[in-house]
Amino acid sequence: MRRFAIASLLAMLMLVLAVSVAFAASPHFKKGGEPVCTFSGTTSIPVTCTGTLAGLGNEDLNLHLSVSGFALYQCQNGGGNTAPGQNKVLEGPATSDTAIPASAIKNGNLTFTTNPATLTAAPTVSGATAGCPNPNWTGVNPVLTLTSITLDIFQPPTIRIFHCTASNPNGLTSPVTLTCTSP
């Protein structure tokens, strides 16, 4: 009975230590380390984000990047003549995940770069979708505009520690610093 009591006490002590280590992590962005996303392009827009975290625990990290926007098409008739389309055709979300092993975190610190999330548009759409004068026209030559970036950071990979966003319905300009909140 005495051995059982000692074993139980040791098990509880180990559990308390493990929980206190887990709660010792206090993730935050280093000064000037907030996520900054860069992108370029008009027919395909790859987006990557970088940032620097501190106060991380010793567990794997997952970065989930999601981007959205719209495309404007030119309207082309059967004779090959073009005119501007009228409709913003929503595109996305395009997503990417970046897995970072715990071994990459040094003393609770990590500088990261996400895998790119690439926003693309179909090369052609129906005339009705593009806002062309009649259904015999086709939407061609899309020009993309990026309007929304979301970066969710998880540690461990199932618990979100930061939700970072930037959006502008008229279009974002690279580079973009994201605004982050923690749950």
Image (cartoon, rainbow, N blue to C red):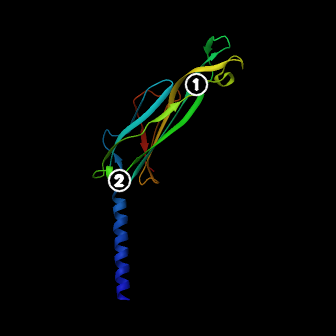
- Amino acid type at image mark 1: Pro
Q: Is any atom of residue 81 visible in this view?
A: yes
Check disc 2 and report the residue beneath it. 102
Q: Is residue 33 above or below residue 84?
A: below
Q: Nearer the viewer, residue 128 or 77?
A: 77
The image position of residue 127, as x and y in percent, is 67, 21
Residue located at (45% from left, 31% from top): 46
- Amino acid type at image mark 2: Ala
Farthest bottom residue in view: 1
The image position of residue 122, as x and y in percent, is 58, 27
Report the number of numbered marks. Answer: 2
* Local secondary structure at mark 2: helix
Q: Is residue 42 above or below residue 3?
A: above
- The image quadrant that residue 85 belongs to is top right
Check disc 1 and report the residue beneath it. 123
Q: Is residue 78 above or below residue 56?
A: above
